[in-house]
Image (tube, rainbow, N blue to C red):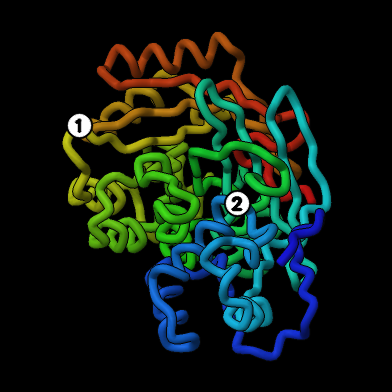
Amino acid sequence: MHINYNGTCQFMNSLKEEKIDILGLPLDKLVNVMQVQYGKGPFHAEALYREVFKKGGTDIGHAPEFKGSPRLWSALEKAIRLLPGRVEKTIEEEGLVKFITRLSDGLAIESVIIPMTRHNTLCVSSQVGCKMGCKFCQTARMGFKRSLTTSEIVGQVFNARHLLGHDIKNIVFMGMGEPFDNFDAVMTAVRVLNSQKGCDIALRHMTISTCGVVPGIERLALMNLPNIRLAVSINGPDDATRSALMPVNRHWPLAALKKSLDAYPLPPRGVFLFEYILIKGVNDSREHAQALARFIHPLPVRLNLIPYNPVTGFDHQSPSDEQMHDFAQTLTDKGIFVIKRWSKGRSVSAGCGQLGKI
């Protein structure tokens, strides 16, 4: 099996066997497929996982586990689907890379590779478009097209690593779409990415961001994954302000959101990540900061303060640096841990809230 530049597979034989969509299969599921369909077990399943996820699937037939079993590999070669999508465009700015992936049905998604001090972070999309309607978000203005499959979610990581050549060690589900509106596919992707035999990305290096879908928070709380990070997009410290910016707040207002966070099983010394996009004249006053501090207390929170990135159809401005500092200082004085995030990628529409200008 060989991967060409556009991320599709080239097989010598036609695909007549039952297909194995390997990018969408957790390892235990692949073990089951190997047992049921081929009479093999973990030995061959783990080898297949290794060759695909760690090595990019470029020459699986020559791996030691398959080299001596040409009939097995011939059957697998006909059955395996490795379709991460076609990367049709990359845009770079000061080390940051945004790439556009064309999916099998012609729709497209955007992903962003963010350079960090010790590793690269990949901002992953979970849907084409979004239902949530946040006023400051370009993806919301696309409307909702469809949710991604697990394979399409994992394919973004596959392409970033093996096609574009970036060492991805951190995953944030903060791209296009609301992850909890595609809960099952996202959580299966987490299992695939977490496997030590495959992508080997630790749960503590994965962050799922939600606009405040309370049932999703409650479902995640029941999954016994304490090390995965939960981020919540707040953006308004009271129901009136937040509902004007984020229609989701009309379904699950701040009181319901805080109740779900109070009940969430954080690990020892664990914190929630809060994201607050600061919009000039909308949610940036000292009173807003004080109300936000009251909402947060006593939750253990690390707050990412992000200046608004302009998007089409939302005629507002970013705050000045001085306004950012003043807002952050008011929160700091109230005991809130604040990180000021000046946006990377704004000029190439890769900043927070800007994905969707495809």
Q: Earlier in the sequence, mark 1 or mark 2?
A: 2
Residue 298, quarter of picture: top left
Q: Residues within 10 Å of mark 1 (few under 14, many from 20)?
A: few
Q: Tell me, yes or no, whether the two marked residues, 1 and 2, touch with CB atoms within 8 Å.
A: no
Q: Residue at x 26, y 61 (%)?
A: 223
Question: Does the image show residue 21?
Answer: yes
Q: Can you give x and y, in whole percent of width and height, for residue 239 in the image?
A: 38, 45
Q: Residue furthest front?
A: 68
Question: Does the image show residue 232?
Answer: no
Left or right: 282 as drawn, with respect to 253: right
Q: Can you give x and y, in whole percent of width and height, for residue 91 in the image?
A: 79, 37
User: Which one is in front, 148 or 59?
Assistant: 59
User: Which one is in front, 195 or 292?
Assistant: 195
Q: Residue furthest top?
A: 322
Q: List the residue tagged with mark 1.
A: 269
- The amino acid on which the numbered mark 2 sits, given as a three-letter code, is Lys
- The amino acid on which the numbered mark 1 sits, given as a three-letter code, is Arg
